[in-house]
Amino acid sequence: AKLDGRGTFRFFEPEMDARMQARRQLELDMRQALARREFQLHYQPQLNLKTNQLTGCEALIRWRHPERGMVSPLDFIPLAEEIGLIVPIGEWVMRQACRDAVSWPAPLSVAVNVSPAQFKSDRLVEMIVSALATSGLPAARLEVEITEGVLLQESEKTLQTLHRLRDLGVRVSMDDFGTGYSSLSYLRSFPFDKIKIDRSFVKDLAVKPDGNAIIRAIAGLGQSLGMTTIAEGVETPEQMERIREEGCTDVQGYLVSRPVPADEIVRLIGSCQ
Ligand code: C2E
Ligand code: CA
Ligand code: CA
Ligand code: CA
């Protein structure tokens, strides 16, 4: 390490330097990606096991980077979250998802992931109201997916925002259920419409002897609380059968379809009608 011109230490650890530089570059690229229209939404359908009909689709962001190709949201959403860029990106996602979903036959809905940093922004509810109004999508056809991270502070403000969304007619889902520390207590603080059972539990179905028990328990919980329970990451017919037996109401996963671009989802929806 040595002092640089401004009197601050600079560490010349090549690995660290390379990582920091990659991160800085990613940040710069991400700041331009919106204006350059490099983001795109893919949609993954959700299927009701009783009616065998699609209920809606989850919007999943994709980044078509000019040099790197497709960048996974797992590789840029956390950074976007950290530096606050998720607010404008999330707004783009919300507006685009509403615009896309309005052309789907009613009552199909669109589920949009909303991150903790977005919840801290004062404009979230107004932005959603505006996205609905501009697109013409009825509030009842929008679903907001939140993770435990949103509720972690469990501030009055967060709950208030959730209730304001609910009052608009927007539905609220608890994403990645069971992976956090206090999933259960969150069900007590807010009446979710839907519980999304994390993919890790679905994976356990095949490999753990009592892998069914947790899914059965969550499905029972959902039933008593009047919440839809959807299993995520369903990849095989065997998993789907088990999940049906254990009482989950809905499934999402590669077995039904991978996430696909907007024009393809329209065709897929059409072929299911
Ligand atoms: P998530 O919200 O839990 O989304 C589900 C992820 O599981 C998606 O990954 C989806 O492609 C993947 N998946 C679905 N079915 C299967 C399956 O059968 N098998 C396997 N192995 N995977 C399956 P994806 O699209 O890479 O997104 C990863 C995460 O990035 C999301 O997890 C979500 O946390 C975040 N994300 C994606 N789009 C957005 C967005 O627009 N806004 C925010 N805030 N976060 C987003
Ligand atoms: Ca989600
Ligand atoms: Ca999830
Ligand atoms: Ca997840």
Image (spheres, grey):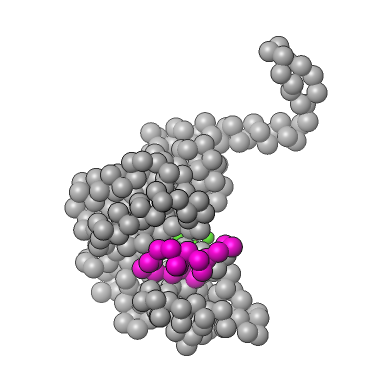
The answer to whether residue 71 is left or right of residue 53 is right
Q: Position of residue 239 (x, y in %)?
A: 52, 80
Residue 117 lies, with reference to residue 207, above or below; the image says: above
**Which residue is at a point 50% across and 43% down the rendered structure image?**
81
Q: Quadrant of residue 42?
A: bottom left
**Which residue is at a point 50% across and 34% down the rendered structure image?**
29
Q: Which image quadrant: the N terminus? A: top right
The answer to whether residue 19 is left or right of residue 249 is right
Q: Which image quadrant: the C terminus? A: bottom left
Region rendered in magenta:
180-197
Q: Nearer the viewer, residue 135 or 167?
A: 167
Q: Position of residue 147 (x, y in %)?
A: 48, 58
Note whether residue 208 is visible.
yes
**Which residue is at a point 34% across and 81% down the rendered structure image?**
52
Residue 163 lies, with reference to residue 202, above or below; the image says: above
Q: Nearer the viewer, residue 165 or 138?
A: 165
In the rendered image, the residue lying farthest to the right is 1
**Which residue is at a point 61% across and 81% down the rendered structure image?**
211
In the rendered image, the residue lying farthest to the front is 156
Note whether residue 241 is visible.
no
